[in-house]
Image: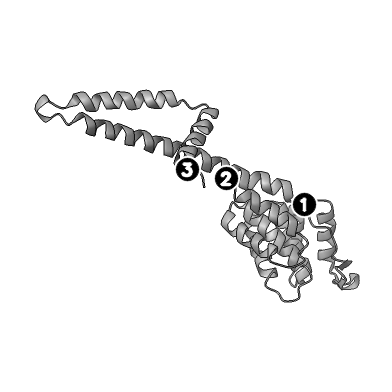
């Protein structure tokens, strides 16, 4: 664990890298100290030692505040934008094919609306695919997965989280592992880092999960 001195040093470096001036802060605090030292009448003047204790405490509070402010801002930027962009890619269209040896909805049972939506999905027209699939009255779980994928790809994070959260609770669902992975990414897209970490840990704890290594890498990044 880093010491307080190390954290203060890193906070100062980050603050100055962003254009801040520690000298300005110290000058302001010195000016305030002078006011404290000279404001009281001779009869009511406080001991000098006590005055400087106040000044030192103000300095420590200011430096600690600088560190946590800049550190938190930088962490948030890395957690959401960079991580999501680095790991997100649309899941392949396997709705009419096979998924890990399990037969998914055969061609002849797919409605015209779902077929149209999957063409839109393949063309990366994700907003249109969401609209088309949402009009279907009886979606299969596999088609609902692509509704979640389209919502995530078009920035409709809340809807994506709701859909993938539903799908991962279905026993024997052929796309459960993929739903779990994209749920983690949806949480990251929505800046819900704590929820993302929980899902990523579940992936790591799942033996043979196809995104095991990626989940470890992201969790390591989020925990920095």
The residue carrying pointer 3 sits among few (fewer than 14), some (14 to 19) or many (20 or more) residues within 10 Å by Cα, namely few
Name the spot of residue 112 as percent of width and height, x first: 85, 66
Q: Secondary structure at mark 1?
A: loop
Q: Earlier in the sequence, mark 3 or mark 2?
A: 3
State the residue position of label 2. Answer: 76
Secondary structure of the residue carrying tag 2 is helix
Give the image location of residue 17, x and y in percent: 55, 29
Q: CA distance from mark 3 to mark 1?
A: 40 Å
Q: Is residue 210 above or below residue 170?
A: above
Position above or below: 31 against 205? above
User: Residue 192 at x, y = what percent?
Assistant: 58, 55
Which numbered mark, 3 or 2, is in the foreground of this view?
3
Task: Report the residue at 69% width, 63% height from top.
Answer: 203
Q: CA distance from mark 3 to mark 2?
A: 23 Å
Please rate how many residues cluster around mark 1, counting C-alpha atoms within 10 Å: few if below 14, some from 14 to 19, many from 20: few
Q: Nearer the viewer, mark 2 or mark 1?
A: 2
Q: Which residue is mark 1?
A: 89
Mark drawn on residue 3: 3
Q: Residue at x 47, y 43 (%)?
A: 3
Residue closer to the observer: 16 or 130: 16
């Amino acid at each position: 664990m880093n010491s307080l001195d190390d954290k203060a040093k890193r906070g100062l470096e980050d603050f100055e890298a962003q254009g801040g001036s520690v000298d300005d802060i110290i000058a302001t605090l010195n000016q305030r100290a002078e006011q404290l030292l000279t404001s009281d009448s001779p009869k009511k003047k406080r001991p000098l030692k006590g005055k400087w204790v106040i000044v030192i405490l103000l300095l420590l509070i200011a430096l600690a505040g600088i560190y946590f402010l800049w550190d938190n801002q930088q962490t948030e930027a890395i957690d959401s934008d960079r991580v999501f962009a680095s790991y997100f890619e649309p899941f392949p269209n396997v709705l009419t094919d096979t998924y890990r040896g399990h037969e998914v909805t055969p061609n002849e049972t797919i409605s015209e609306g779902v077929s149209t939506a999957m063409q839109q999905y393949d063309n990366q027209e994700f907003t249109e695919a969401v609209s088309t699939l949402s009009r279907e009255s009886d979606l299969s779980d596999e088609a609902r997965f692509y509704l979640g994928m389209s919502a995530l790809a078009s920035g409709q994070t809340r809807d994506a989280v709701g859909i993938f959260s539903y799908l991962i609770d279905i026993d024997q669902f052929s796309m459960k592992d993929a739903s779990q992975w994209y749920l983690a990414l949806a949480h990251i897209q929505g800046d819900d880092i704590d929820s993302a970490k929980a899902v990523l840990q579940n992936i790591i704890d799942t033996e043979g999960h196809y995104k095991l290594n990626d989940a470890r890498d992201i969790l390591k990044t989020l925990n920095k």
